[in-house]
Structure formats: C-alpha cells, structure tokens
Image (cartoon, helix red, strand yellow):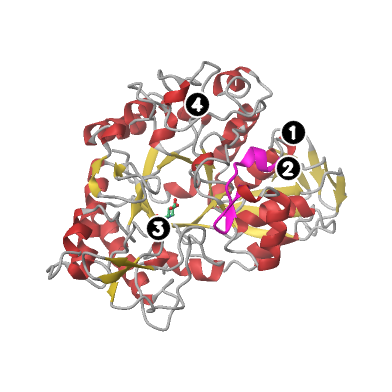
Amino acid sequence: MTEPTPGWYKRAVFYETPVYAFGDSDGDGIGDFPGLTARLDYLQWLGIDCIWLLPFYESPLHDGGYDVSDFEAVLPRYGNVENVVAFLAAAHERGLRVITDMIVNHTSDQHPWFQAARQPGSPTRSRYVWSETPDRYPNARVIFIDTQDSNWSWDPVAGVYYWHRFFEHQPDLNFDDPWVRNAIKDVVRFWLDKGFDGLRLDAVPYLYERDGTNGENLPETHEYLKELRAMVDEEYPGRILLAEANQWPEDVVPYFGDDDECHMAFHFPVMPRLFMALKQQRAGAVIDILARTPPIPATAQWGIFLRNHDELTLEMVTEQERAYMYAQYAPDPQMRKNLGIRRRLAPLLDGDRRRIELLQSLVLSLPGSPFLYYGDEIGMGDEYLLEDRDGVRTPMQWDDSPSAGFSPADPGDLYLPLVSAPDYAPATLNVAAARSDEGSLLNRIRRLIAIRSAHPAFGLGDYFAVTADNPAAMAFLRRAAGEQILVVANFSERAIRTSLALAEPAHWVDIGPNRPDTWSTGSAFELVPFGCRWLTAASDGVD
Ligand code: NOJ
C-alpha cells in the first residue's frame, strides 16, 4: 500500500490505459492483468506517477466494460481479483499509484440487480428508475445521439419503461433508494480495500432525476458525493475521487465542493479549444476558457487531457465551434461519433511532431494534472472505421513483431486489429524503436514529464495569465512555494515575436528541452513555429 501523502494527485502525471489494450500474457489476444503488470517497468521508465484503469469488471462488453454486470468480480479474460492485487502491489513497489473507473450511474441490464428489479412484483423494483410513460424528464438530453432516440426504453418483463442516460442496455440506478446509495459505497470499499489509490467517478452528473430539470448537476448528486467523500476521508485517507463531469467550468467547479466532494475533475472545455486554437493559429479560445474558469479550493485539482478512450467530445463548445471542429478535424463523416470525433491525437494533428509536442507541452503545464492516453506518447494512430469508439482502443504497439509485442497470438486473433496505415502501423511505429531513437517523440515526452516532475509549481502553482501582444501567443505563470514558471506557447506555424506584460523578475532561464536559452523581461520574446517554452526566474533559489 502507498503511504497517504496528502495532495499527491496535484503533482502526479496520470496515464490512462484499458487492461485489454496493454499486454496479453496468455495468448488469447486480449490484454490482462499479468500482461499489464509485465509492462510496469515501461511506465516507470516513462516517468508517470499514476495509472488510470478503464473498467475491468464482469460485463457483457457492449460499452467497453462501462456496462457492468458484477461490480465485485473481474472479467475472467482479464484475470481475477488476486491478479489485480498482485498488479497493485507491483505498481506500488515501483512508486506508481493506480486509480480505477467506478461506474456509479448505471449497470448493465445483465446485472442481477436489474434482472431482479424487473420481475413483476419485485421488492427491489426501486433500485432502478421506471415510468408508465416514456415522456417524463423531457429536458434531459440524449447523450448517445447516434444510437439512442430516448432516455426511456420499454421493458417487456417489468411492463414499464426504464430510464437510461446512455445505451438502452445500461439502466440507471435509482439513487433515491437508500439501498443503492449504500451498495455503491460498498463497491467503493471493496476496491479501495484491494489497494486502489482512487476512483474516477464515471458519468457523475446524472445520478438523480427530478421533474422540471435536465437531470444534470442536481443538488442531490452533490449531497451524495459529500457522503462518499466523507467516507473515503474517514476510511481511506489519501485516496482520491475524480469526477467525470463533461460540463461548463462553472458547473464542474461545484464537484470540488468546499473541499468536501471530489479531489479532481476533468477540465472538459479546455480540451477542444486547444485543438481549435491550433487550427486558428490564435491562442484566444484557450486563454478565454481559462479566464472563464472559476477558482477552485486549494486542495482541488483539474485533470487536463487531450484524448481519451471516448470520442473527442464537442459537447462543451458552441454550435458554430462544433461545425468548425468537424470541418477541420473530421472531414470524413465516418470520423464523427455522437457529438465528437473518434480519432487519436497524432492523426488529428497529421502526425506533425511540432503540433503534437506543443499540445503535450501545454497539457503538462496548464493548471492541473496531465492525463496521457496510452500510445499517444509514441504518436499511435487509429482505425476510425471500427465500431463505435474501438478505433482509438487498438492494441499498444510495443515492437515490430507480427502482433506488435502485445500478444503471442496471431494478429488476426487480437481483440481488435492493429493499426494498419503504413505511417502508424507497428512496423514503423512502436515503443522499442522509439526508445532507442534519442530524438523520438517518446523520448521528448519522457523528458518533458521529467522536467515537470522536478518543478513543483507545475502541479501546485496558481495560474496567472500574462498578456501577450501577438494573438498567436499564450503566456502564463505558474507560481508556488517561491518558484515561478513562465510558459509561453506559439499556436502559429510561423516563428513569432511577442511582448509580454510582465514587469519582473528581470531574467528568466529556459528549463524546457531547448535550454540554455534565456529571456530578459521587457525584451521581445521569440518562439519557433508551434514552439512552447518553459522558463524559471533566474533568481529562483539564488536570493
Ligand atoms: C463515460 C465513459 O467514458 C464512456 O466510455 C461510456 O460509454 C459512458 N460513460 C457510459 O458509461
């Protein structure tokens, strides 16, 4: 077990991976816990601090495992609870922490809770949400618009409609039933007892339904989170709750409560704006959304990310911005999914190292803790024609062998095909090749992670926007415990000069990979195309 170090998550670099995608130890073509455990040395070498595991619980797998049929069992193809415990011990031995996904809002329709609740006259009917008619809660939007027409589906066994915010095979739990509230706490205890360092709370805005509302961010949801947090603080000090709340900044900030709800929450709106700013070659969209982000409690932390296992969501943009993003980043309509784009980072940026490094440098320096998505550190590609979001969930590419070092199985027997585009296929793009090439993207990202980790202000510091007179430039300070870091980024394809509205200190030194450059306050600040510089005050630690 790792020691409870308060605030560890604020300095941590997170790394998201599904168990099924990382390493297959038994040759069935599907990643498993022993396979993942065998790859921990790589993650330690990369310099990350905390792994985020996607759901690995018993599931019919109609939603990548977010459709859980037994919260306290491991899907046998991934291993068993002993394998999970051994994996956690091996991670902790290496100083790595691990958080896991906790699907609190819904279950699979195969879950015994639902199977029992739907029976005529069932005494447990109230564990789910039912209605005689499918017109209740009309203000609640449908999230999976490509496949669902309504949040209600008819259950022929129960003879009534049941409520689901996602797929029709994922009935929502009814948090008005105290049994449900307690049962979820017990699931949380079950996995924290096994040694997980925290939980990502999936789909957390939708726990309650109330007439006349859109069913998002309701006061009752915040009440429940306060109960959960009190329990975690009391029984598992040092473990964290991370909110997946795809909402506007002012609606996410309440998920931190008054330091009594979640420790962390993803900053969804900043993500598409990083991509937008890059195409516009103007920094304004990113600067503005951060200006619009209310302050958060001192112990709270944003999760900053570029891509994850879902579509690049375009829910937190205007309609006009969404149309722009689709036109720029998803010219083929098949690249679109729900309100988003099902592509990976590198292909989105045309494999352009400069633009990938710019966005990764920002993820590693914006206020919050960075979340990297497996494979993006080597610039992995996607297969967007695969079903649903599978195209961004293909096997990790370890080497150039037929199954990419992921599995002893034949390539045709893997859970999903390997990426096939020549520029992105394992023969060209893999960890082994990237590790041995000093100039690779992988080695560059590893270096950036090391620099971030060496400077507490990246994780702990406040955010202070610095005005730059060049619209392509974004500048800000991160300040904590006597350390000041200046970050200046250039969203344009041209080399730029900009003035920065900073009065002091007089001298700065680059700490990024392009050191030993310096900058004197008041002089023109220079950036290469898509450049991003990190600097510290030259006087830091001297006087
Ligand atoms: C959010 C998860 O990230 C996504 O993958 C899943 O489909 C939905 N929640 C529904 O569980």
Circle 2 crowding by C-alpha within 10 Å: few under 14, some 14–19, many from 20: many
Disc 4 Cβ-to-ligand 1 distance below 8 Å:
no
Q: Examine the rendered structure and indicate whether residue 357 appears above or below residue 93.
A: below
Farthest residue, direction front? 156
Answer with mark 2 or mark 3, whichever residue precedes in sequence.
3
Label 1, secondary structure: give it: loop
Disc 3 Cβ-to-ligand 1 distance below 8 Å:
yes
Single out the mark in the foreground, 2 or 3.
3
Q: Are marks 1 and 2 in contact (CB under 8 Å)?
A: yes
| Three-letter amino acid code of the residue under disc 4 | Trp
For the residue pair 108 and 377, the one nearer the viewer reads as 108
The residue tagged 2 is: 533
Answer with mark 2 or mark 4, whichever residue precedes in sequence.
4
The residue tagged 4 is: 45
The residue tagged 1 is: 514
Q: Examine the rendered structure and indicate whether residue 292 appears above or below residue 456.
A: below
Single out the mark in the foreground, 2 or 4.
4
Q: Quadrant of the C terminus?
A: top right
For the residues marked 1 and 4, what is the alpha-carbon distance in whole angstroms? 22 Å
Label 2, secondary structure: give it: strand
> What residue range appears in magenta?
335-349
Label 3, secondary structure: give it: loop
The residue tagged 3 is: 167
Residue drawn 69% across the image and 61% down it: 323
For the residue pair 124 and 32, the one nearer the viewer reads as 124
Where residue 165 appears, as percent x and y from the top left, is 40, 64
Answer with mark 1 or mark 4, whichever residue precedes in sequence.
4
Based on the displayed image, in which of its 4 quarters is residue 120 positioned? bottom left
Asked if residue 98 lies in the magenta stretch, the reply is no
For the residues marked 2 and 3, what is the alpha-carbon distance in whole angstroms? 44 Å
For the residues marked 3 and 4, what is the alpha-carbon distance in whole angstroms? 39 Å
